[in-house]
């Protein structure tokens, strides 16, 4: 499961953090809102990003993407 956090504005950014993972420091700042849990985000990503998101998530503990 992934916890999703959203930062609104002209461009909507979403940060996915695995259950039990440490929250990145920037999520504690103003503007980020918890929006729920999902089992996967691959279907929300452009095709070109799907291959890399799992490795980035593993390496950093989170994945930030722009909501289409």
Image: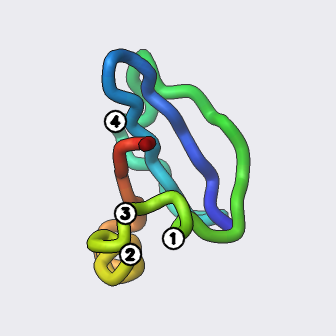
> Which of disc 2 and disc 1 is earlier in sequence?
1
Q: Residue at x 39, y 23 (%)?
A: 29
> Which of disc 2 and disc 4 is earlier in sequence?
4
Q: Check if mark 2's residue and mark 3's residue have beta carbons within 8 Å.
A: yes
Is disc 1 placed on a helix, strand or loop? helix
63 displayed left or right of 59: right
Q: Check if mark 1's residue and mark 2's residue have beta carbons within 8 Å.
A: yes
Q: Which of the two discs, 3 and 1, sits closer to the camera?
A: 3
Is disc 3 placed on a helix, strand or loop? loop
Q: Mark 1 points at which residue?
A: 42
- Within 10 Å of the Cα at label 1, are there few (<14), some (14-19), or many (20+) other Cα atoms? few
18 displayed left or right of 37: left
Q: Which residue is drawn at 54% across and 39% down?
A: 5
Q: Mark 2 points at which residue?
A: 50
- Within 10 Å of the Cα at label 3, are there few (<14), some (14-19), or many (20+) other Cα atoms? few
Q: Where is residue 20 in the image (x, y as percent from the top left)?
A: 63, 64
Q: Mark 4 points at which residue?
A: 26
Compute the Cα span from label 3 to label 1. Answer: 8 Å
The one nearer the camera, 34 or 39, is 39
Q: Name the residue under label 3.
A: 46
Q: Which of the two discs, 1 and 4, sits closer to the camera?
A: 1
Q: Where is residue 55 in the image (x, y as percent from the top left)?
A: 33, 82
Is disc 2 placed on a helix, strand or loop? helix
Compute the Cα span from label 4 to label 3. Answer: 24 Å
Q: Which residue is drawn at 45% across and 47% down?
A: 15
């Amino acid at each position: 499961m992934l916890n999703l956090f959203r930062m609104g504005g002209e461009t909507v950014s979403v940060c996915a953090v695995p259950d039990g993972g440490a929250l990145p420091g920037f999520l504690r700042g103003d503007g980020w809102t918890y929006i729920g849990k999902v089992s996967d985000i691959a279907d929300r990503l452009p095709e070109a990003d799907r291959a890399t998101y799992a490795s980035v998530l593993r390496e950093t503990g989170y994945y930030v993407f722009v909501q289409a």
